[in-house]
Image (tube, helix red, strand yellow):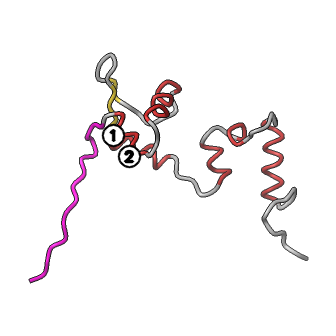
Amino acid sequence: MSEVPPTITLDLYKELTPTEAAEFRNVSTRKQEKERQEGTGPKYIKVGYRTVRYRFIDLLEYQEAHLVENTIQGAQILGGCAFINSTAESDAECRKRVNQYNAGGAHGQKKRATD
């Protein structure tokens, strides 16, 4: 007689507390609070004057929307070049640098085709 593997059941509409949601996302509750204030985090439910809940499905959708394959793509999701700049470089200068990188110049890692 073969053993039946366990079935996992997820309630996608389960409401999580901010602490549970932060733990799932591996961020601090303070970061999550800041995201709510700035409107940059996952959707949430305002239950009362001070009570907030996160639906599991909204956390999954937020994660899915923020999947990236490289740093440039990540910067585009998070607000463009200004996000990855640690200097006062203008957005135009940053885009020029990114284009140079993609073309293989200015210390870019891409190899150019040889004739």
Residue drawn at x 48%, y 35% as measured from the top left? 41
Residue 22 falls in which quadrant of the image?
top left
Q: Position of residue 50 (x, y in %)?
A: 34, 19
Label 1 belongs to which residue?
A: 20
Q: In which quadrant is the N terminus drawn?
A: bottom left
Disc 2 crowd rating (10 Å Cα; few below 14, some 14-19, many 20+) is few
> Is 82 colored magenta in this rendering?
no
Write the residue at 64% across / 50% down: 73
Dot 1 amino acid type? Glu
Q: Which residues are magenta?
A: 1-16
Q: Position of residue 18 (x, y in %)?
A: 36, 33
Q: Is residue 101 left or right of residue 35?
A: right
Q: Position of residue 95 (x, y in %)?
A: 79, 44
Q: Secondary structure at mark 2?
A: helix
Pointers 1 and 2 in contact (C-beta within 8 Å): yes
Write the residue at 84% across / 72% down: 113
Q: Nearer the viewer, residue 98 or 53?
A: 53
Residue 109 location, quadrant: bottom right
Left or right: 87, with 59 as reference point: right
Residue sitting nearer the eye, 115 or 97: 97
Please say whether residue 10 is one of the residues in the magenta stretch: yes
- Above or below, 46 against 85 in this view is above
Q: Amino acid at mark 2?
A: Phe
Q: Which residue is mark 2?
A: 24
Q: Is residue 63 left or right of residue 56?
A: right
